[in-house]
Amino acid sequence: MDMDAIIEALGGAAQVQTLLGVGPSAVSNYRARGQFPEYARIRIWQALKARGITVDPETLSVEPSGQANPIASSNSTVSPSISPATGLATVSIPQSPRILLIISGGIAAYKSLELIRRIKDKGWHIRCIMTASAEQFITPLSVSALSGETTYTELFSLTDEAEMGHIRLAREADAIVIAPATANIMAKMAYGFADDLATTVLLATDAPTLIAPAMNPFMWAHPATQANQRQLKIRGVSFVGPDSGDMACGEDGAGRLAEIPQIINAISRILPGNGRLNGKTALVTSGPTHEPIDRVRYIANRSSGKQGHAIAAALARQGAKVTLISGPVDIPPPAGVHVVAVETAQDMLTASLAAMPVDIAICAAAVGDFSVVNSGVNSGANSGANSAAHKIKKSDTGDAPQLFLQQNPDILATIADHKMRPRLVIGFAAETDDVVNYAIAKRLRKKADWILANDVGQDEQPVFGSDFNMVHLVTENGVEPWSEMSKHDLADQLVSRIAKEISA
Ligand SMILES: Cc1cc2nc3c(=O)[nH]c(=O)nc-3n(C[C@H](O)[C@H](O)[C@H](O)COP(=O)(O)O)c2cc1C
């Protein structure tokens, strides 16, 4: 795709920024990648159409309407004659956001009727899907009457598939909202089920997704539901609520659908271009590093990457363009972030510097402090400079090989002292003793802006691998103890602080 020609046809980079609600660096990234993000295609298609240019939204191959096909249909470029100078009207943007509301089968389904009205009050376009269970609580007729659109219920409906198939429903949404979300639909999403229209659309989308759970407090507190929630958050899905209080089932506790204005605010936040870090760029390092000893062995640590990945997901939810530089981990990458997989500390440093310049750098990886200079010296298996090229063998004499270590580069200090230093540089300090004092000293020594200090030495509260974390935030203004919370909540709290700092 000829990005320059398309951007020119849209009136230039500034128009594209306004159209997509992104900053200049995002448009540069699209040019560099040679493609627009999936969610943007329909908007671009509409804007080009408004300028009299016919476009295939799937490939965004461009062809001026009314002309005798001067442009090839694939790998095509916009004709040089197409420019703002053609006198075509300026792009009528922004388009109103398109919300796809999925209503699942909980007692709070009736509240979705009010939600539809409030969504329409915002001037947003809304389409609805109902699960079969939702139809036990409210009718598609009421939903259609309020939304002013067909309500979709069937995966295997010839009419629906002909007019509006599940893939189009997924594509033509700027945001997907599931309200109320049952325990069942969350479980299906977590495991990738696609056995009805709602879950098939959810599997076929990359649009930002918001879940508003509503269920009995025992169902919400159940470890299965909690694990599903965590899994979905890891993938970048946003949540609003549930609230606590009296439930329709007569019980009291967490499980009530969030209030409608809360849901509307949460939708605003996930709409592309509406995040608090919209137009900002960030790099996040996450996970452990593996420092090879020989071809099969390595020195590693217990970091799972959960905290770094959660931070990357939270930054992306707030609209930042995130490069996640991850050591070897067993968790999936969050949605909407660019992942660079690395193994060693040296690779992580190289990838971090390649991701710069950025506005924000968060070094959450547990970077190995040492790498092997040469190994197997006594075994005679290796005379090389770094890790052994072959597997080091046991010796007949029973002598163990000696490993010689060298200190690895300091990624946090390198970024903080770099000529392209990000506006905000944040590090983690995982220590076993005197955690806060160490973090205060580390912040100054490494020229970081903030350090999040956590105690990894407590047997009863392991941090590595856990879903929870407890930190002290160390800044130039002092030390703030943060209460224990899930790594996702901590990521949201940190990102909220970052947004405040960046906008100050
Ligand atoms: C009267 C009644 C009320 C229910 N309310 C809820 C609820 O509030 N939240 C929930 O997760 N499940 C609730 N359920 C159970 C769901 O309807 C059930 O899990 C169903 O399979 C959900 O299907 P869906 O996720 O495809 O909509 C309720 C069931 C009944 C019979």
Image (cartoon, rainbow, N blue to C red):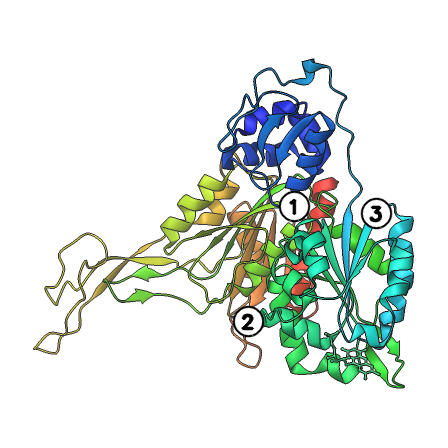
Left or right placement of residue 213 versus residue 340 in this view: right
Q: Name the image quarter holding the C terminus.
A: top right
Query: Mark 1–mark 3 contact, CB under 8 Å?
Result: no
Mark toward the start of the polypeptide (1 vs 3)? 1
The numbered disc on residue 221 is none
Q: Dot 2: what SS?
A: loop
Instruction: Check the image and report above or below for 258 versus 406.
Output: below
Q: Dot 3: what SS?
A: loop
Mark toward the start of the polypeptide (1 vs 2)? 1
Give the crowd class for mark 1: few <14, some 14-19, many >=20 residues within 10 Å.
Answer: many
Which residue position is annotated with label 1?
A: 39
Which residue position is annotated with label 3?
A: 124
Mark toward the start of the polypeptide (2 vs 3)? 3
Which residue position is annotated with label 2?
A: 463
Left or right placement of residue 429 versus residue 185 in this view: left
Q: CA distance from mark 2 to mark 3?
A: 42 Å
Can residue 84 be seen at all in this image of the molecule?
yes
**Amino acid on which the number 3 mark rests in the picture:** Trp
Q: Nearer the viewer, residue 503 or 155?
A: 155
Q: Nearer the viewer, mark 1 or mark 2?
A: 1
Residue drawn at x 60%, y 27% is 63
Q: CA distance from mark 1 to mark 2?
A: 36 Å
Question: Residue 291: where, in percent of width, then height?
Answer: 33, 60
Give the crowd class for mark 3: few <14, some 14-19, many >=20 residues within 10 Å.
Answer: some
**Amino acid on which the number 1 mark rests in the picture:** Tyr
Q: Nearer the viewer, residue 15 or 464?
A: 15
Q: CA distance from mark 1 to mark 3?
A: 16 Å
Q: Nearer the viewer, residue 317 or 62?
A: 62
**Amino acid on which the number 2 mark rests in the picture:** Val
Q: Quadrant of ligand 1?
A: bottom right
